[in-house]
Image (tube, rainbow, N blue to C red):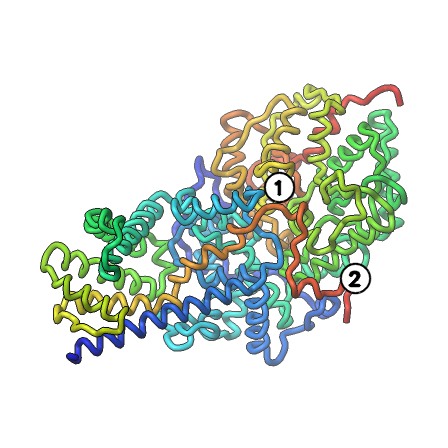
């Protein structure tokens, strides 16, 4: 089923021997003018691109302390070299985080540092040429910006920051990535990544209401654009139609229904995902974030809650207040924004949800910490709440739960292999190989404890696993939404 | 003044100036460059006090490195901690009278040199024999180790093998500080030691040694995790248009 070799699952994660150039051929489709231009980028490689790229690099060095410090501080200690899932899955040395950073750092050194200007060979500095640019395009689209390397770096160097800067530079000289930029354009014009217009969204949600009522006999609502609701739910648009995402959306609706919370979604801001982050563009990320502010103001809601989506939660939790705040028009008794898991866990603790975990007794599950939730955000009041709260919810709604090995979960979690704007069919080889460490960890609990389902709280993880699990011998439907299990375990009050 | 004294004087003054000015400029750049987004690697402390503890655990214990790789950690940590004690021991050449705690650490500093040596050899061995680290090494990475090793070995040589005239050494450096120039002892090992130290001081602001100030400015380690409670906004970002549509 593949025109590349699918890696073999081992007992434990093994560090491969280096295979130079193993993934040099991997490149996503290049964006075209129709998607570049609306985002503020040239439609094709500009004439004086070398100078333009260096100017952009200089601009970013002055705007982002992370970029400046991370390019200077690396001592090549090697701590990160075996930490990237793409390296572990592909053996390509340029997928070692430090080597990936060096693709950019060697140009930084050549043009921005004394040592690189006068002793380029000594410090490994190189001129910027087309070959280097092509290599950037290839390898900065082999980083899912999962931040695993940053956990282990003694200086906290985050390759995600370097990748984002590199993509911003590439975009600014006219070499964008089709997948991300087309999606950003859709979300900025139509409100969501899929380009679903309001009527289609409305129909989908009405169908969903019918389906759920037929299924459980309770009139759970999935409202759209309802002014005066208390809660605005922002969820990834995949939740509207994809499996298993939609089961998660059904679950959020059930929780809101049971709690008696009036809520709505917005067609104007019908997308939690924010691909502006993936391309390192503050401006594009902000334009998307501001749609949420505008929707909240127009609908007159009191709270904003986000559905299950990894990087969306990072942007929401860490950046939304910066990009689109202040949110002083919302109810100050709730954090802005809240994660649906925070809402659910709070209700469980207060005894407001009656749960019957035996409803999920046919399942034996484990939890996949999504990278951006794990290392770029928080839930609740305590550091690490992003690990504890989803697990606590899960353990309240299932009886069979086992964690994967420690070095593959929580802050050390492995990315699904499809994050960071790489969830596109033109990168299938990379996605399959990048999933290797997670699949090995899953196999471990499968073989030892009989775990048969992986639960996630991220739209990208869910889509990625649905697609790549079959390559490793797992069923494509062995990935589930957390709120599907919540919804299934929920016992509804009869006094409607 | 002998030619040697003139050369060593000029060299040490230049090295000190380059180190201070170069490092000062870099630190100024780091400090004035904004961090427009909250990007602590989470779980992260939710208070400023927590951040101080996190940073302390990084610079004193090398906490992240410990999580990553025990071999790099043991060699790297041993080298840095020993270097710190050895450097402190050297304060006796720049203070008169010598501070009490500098007196106390003298024997630790004397033998600490061997811990430095073992650390450096261990790190270099990994750089040569571990395929992944060999791949990411530039010539400058090897030269830096060679330089540090040279400084360590000449230091050990003067302390344990062929003693140098430390009274004269102290007189020379105290003289530099008081602009009362004293002769530099014509000991080849000492000349090599001070020359290499000067070289290290000069390359500090233009090399990976910038990791020392850099770690304190690393946003993934020095930011408080409180974006929902406190709005974080950098000056350049505050000037962007506040509209969801593209401004042309």
Tell me what residue is drawn at x 25 percent, y 59 percent. B95
Residue A378 circle label: 1
Q: State left or right for residue A215 relative to residue A52.
A: right
Determine the image quadrant of residue A110.
bottom left
Tell me what residue is drawn at x 66 percent, y 29 percent. A393
Near mark 2 (Cα within 10 A), the count class, few <14, some 14-19 or many ≥20, is some
Asked which secondary structure carries label 2, the reply is: loop
Q: Are marks 2 and 1 in contact (CB under 8 Å)?
A: no
Asked which secondary structure carries label 1, the reply is: loop
Q: Position of residue B138 (x, y in %)?
A: 36, 64
Q: State left or right for residue B136 relative to residue A179.
A: left
Determine the image quadrant of residue A369.
top right
Tell me what residue is drawn at x 48 percent, y 69 percent. A108
Q: Position of residue B132 (x, y in %)?
A: 38, 54
Q: Is residue B226 above or below residue A368?
A: below
Q: Is residue B198 above or below residue A414?
A: below
Residue A30 circle label: none
Residue closest to the eye, A311 or B131: A311
Which residue lies most toward the front here? B97
Residue closest to the eye, A358 or A113: A113
Tags 2 and 1 on a common chain: no
Q: State left or right for residue B94 relative to residue A272.
A: left
Residue B243 circle label: 2
Residue closest to the eye, A421 or A392: A392
Q: Position of residue A338 (x, y in %)?
A: 72, 41
The C terminus of chain A appears in which quarter of the rendering? top right
Tell me what residue is drawn at x 15 percent, y 66 percent. B168
């Amino acid at each position: 089923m593949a025109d590349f070799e699918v890696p073999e699952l081992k007992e434990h994660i093994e560090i491969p021997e280096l295979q130079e150039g193993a993934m040099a051929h991997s490149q996503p489709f290049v964006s075209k003018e129709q998607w570049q231009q609306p985002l503020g980028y040239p439609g094709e490689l500009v004439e004086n691109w070398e100078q333009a790229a260096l100017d952009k690099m200089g601009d970013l060095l002055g705007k982002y302390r992370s970029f400046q410090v991370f390019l200077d501080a690396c001592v090549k200690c090697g701590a990160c070299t075996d930490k990237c899932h793409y390296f572990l899955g592909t053996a390509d040395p340029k997928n070692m985080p430090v080597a990936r950073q060096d693709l950019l750092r060697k140009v930084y050194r050549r043009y921005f540092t004394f040592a690189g200007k006068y002793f380029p060979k000594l410090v490994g500095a190189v001129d910027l040429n087309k070959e280097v640019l092509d290599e950037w395009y290839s390898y900065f689209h082999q980083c899912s910006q999962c931040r695993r390397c940053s956990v282990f770096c003694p200086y906290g160097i985050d390759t995600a920051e370097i990748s984002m800067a590199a993509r911003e530079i590439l975009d600014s000289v006219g070499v964008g990535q089709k997948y991300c930029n087309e999606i950003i354009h859709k979300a900025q014009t139509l409100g969501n990544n899929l380009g679903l217009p309001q009527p289609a969204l409305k129909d989908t949600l009405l169908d969903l209401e019918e389906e759920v009522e037929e299924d459980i006999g309770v009139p759970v609502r999935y409202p759209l654009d309802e002014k005066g609701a208390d809660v605005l739910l922002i969820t990834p648009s995949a939740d509207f139609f994809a499996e298993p995402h939609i089961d998660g959306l059904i679950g959020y609706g059930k929780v809101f229904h049971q709690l008696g919370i009036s809520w709505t979604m917005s067609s104007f801001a019908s997308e939690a995902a924010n691909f502006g982050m993936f391309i390192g563009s503050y401006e594009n990320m902000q334009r998307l974030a501001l749609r949420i502010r505008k929707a909240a103001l127009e609908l007159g809601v009191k709270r904003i809650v986000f559905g299950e989506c990894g990087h969306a939660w990072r942007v929401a939790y860490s950046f939304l207040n910066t990009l689109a705040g202040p949110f002083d028009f919302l109810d100050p008794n709730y954090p802005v924004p809240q994660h649906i898991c925070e809402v659910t866990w709070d209700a469980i603790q207060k005894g407001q949800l009656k749960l019957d975990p035996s409803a999920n007794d046919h399942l034996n599950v484990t939890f996949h910490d999504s990278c951006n939730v794990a290392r770029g955000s928080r839930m609740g009041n305590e550091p690490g709440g992003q690990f504890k709260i989803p697990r606590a919810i899960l353990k309240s709604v299932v009886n069979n739960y086992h964690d994967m090995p420690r070095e593959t979960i929580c802050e050390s979690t492995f990315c699904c292999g499809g994050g960071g704007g790489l969830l596109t069919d033109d990168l299938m080889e990379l996605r399959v190989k990048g999933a290797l460490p997670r699949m090995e960890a899953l196999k471990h609990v499968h073989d030892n404890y009989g775990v048969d389902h992986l639960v996630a709280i991220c739209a990208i993880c869910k889509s990625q696993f649905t697609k790549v699990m079959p390559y490793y011998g797992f069923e494509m439907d062995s990935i589930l939404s957390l709120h599907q299990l919540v919804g299934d375990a929920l016992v509804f009050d009869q006094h409607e | 003044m002998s030619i040697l004294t003139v050369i060593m004087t000029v060299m040490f003054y230049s090295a000190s100036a380059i180190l201070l000015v170069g490092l000062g400029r870099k630190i100024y750049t780091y400090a004035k460059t904004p961090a427009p987004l909250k990007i602590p690697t989470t779980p992260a402390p939710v208070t400023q006090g927590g951040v101080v503890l996190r940073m302390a655990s990084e610079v004193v214990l090398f906490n992240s490195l410990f999580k990553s790789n025990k071999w790099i950690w043991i060699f790297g940590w041993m080298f840095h901690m020993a270097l710190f004690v050895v450097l402190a021991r050297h304060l006796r050449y720049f203070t008169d009278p010598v501070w009490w705690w500098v007196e106390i650490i003298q024997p630790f500093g004397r033998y600490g040199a061997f811990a430095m040596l073992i650390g450096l050899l261990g790190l270099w061995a990994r750089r040569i024999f571990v395929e992944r680290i060999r791949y990411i090494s530039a010539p400058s990475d090897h030269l830096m180790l060679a330089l540090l090793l040279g400084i360590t070995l000449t230091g050990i040589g003067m302390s344990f093998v062929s003693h140098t005239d430390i009274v004269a050494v102290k007189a020379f450096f105290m003289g530099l500080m008081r602009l009362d120039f004293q002769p530099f002892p014509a000991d080849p090992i000492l000349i090599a030691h001070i020359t290499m130290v000067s070289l290290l001081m000069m390359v500090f602001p233009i090399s990976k040694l910038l990791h020392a100030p850099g770690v304190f400015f690393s946003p993934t380690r020095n930011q408080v995790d409180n974006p929902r409670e406190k709005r974080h906004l950098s000056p350049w970002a505050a000037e962007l248009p506040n509209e969801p549509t593209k401004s042309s």
